[in-house]
């Protein structure tokens, strides 16, 4: 998995090598949701496409970084991930919220709206 070269990409893949630049640094400007999952994880295969659709639908109000946990175990370890999928919200360089497991679209919209609001408020 590699970060897409288009800096404006709303949905992109990250690895251990580019995590800090792709997620932490970019979250200074725009909130970034980090979706940590695995190909073998059924709930991940449900949540991933829904998050991607929402990211594109929100028109850049937040970014979505996909992490393949099998290829990037240090990212999962660094974030003390206990199960997949885990979605972690970054704003202004730090984690501000997270959730585990597949969720409904209503839950996701509420979570995303809260992250965007907190980012705008400087939290």
Image: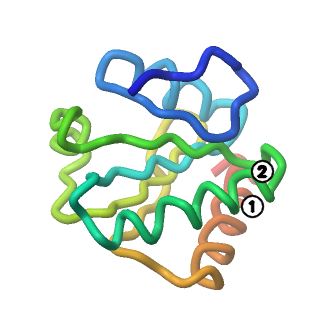
Residue indicated by mark 2: 120
Task: Please tell me the numbered disc located at residue 30.
Answer: none
| Neighbourhood count class around disc 2 (C-alpha, 10 Å): few under 14, some 14–19, many 20 upward | few
Spot occupied by residue 96 in the image (x, y as percentages of width and height): 49, 54
Q: Position of residue 8 (x, y in %)?
A: 75, 26
Q: Residue at x 50, y 53 (%)?
A: 89
Relative image position of residue 26 (x, y in whole percent):
61, 27
Q: Residue at x 26, y 63 (%)?
A: 84
In the drawing, does residue 70 fall left or right of residue 18?
Answer: left
Find the distance from the CA under tag 1 to the CA under tag 2. Answer: 5 Å
The answer to whether 117 is drawn above or below residue 109 in the figure is: above
- Nearer to us in this view, 89 or 18: 18
Q: Which residue is mark 1?
A: 117
Residue sitting farthest toward the right: 59
> How many residues crowd mark 1 within 10 Å: few (<14), some (14–19), many (20+)?
few
**Disc 1, disc 2: CB below 8 Å?**
yes
Which is more toward the observer, 31 or 65? 65
């Amino acid at each position: 998995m590699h970060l897409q070269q288009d800096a404006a990409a709303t949905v992109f893949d990250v690895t251990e090598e580019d995590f800090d630049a792709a997620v932490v640094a970019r979250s200074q400007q725009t909130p970034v949701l980090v979706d940590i999952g695995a190909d073998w994880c059924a709930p991940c295969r449900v949540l991933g496409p829904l998050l991607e659709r929402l990211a594109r639908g929100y028109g850049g109000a937040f970014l979505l970084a996909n992490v393949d946990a099998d290829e990037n175990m240090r990212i999962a370890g660094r974030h003390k991930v206990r199960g997949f999928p885990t979605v972690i919200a970054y704003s202004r360089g730090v984690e501000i919220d997270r959730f585990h497991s597949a969720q409904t679209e209503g839950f996701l919209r509420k979570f995303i709206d809260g992250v965007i609001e907190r980012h705008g408020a400087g939290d």
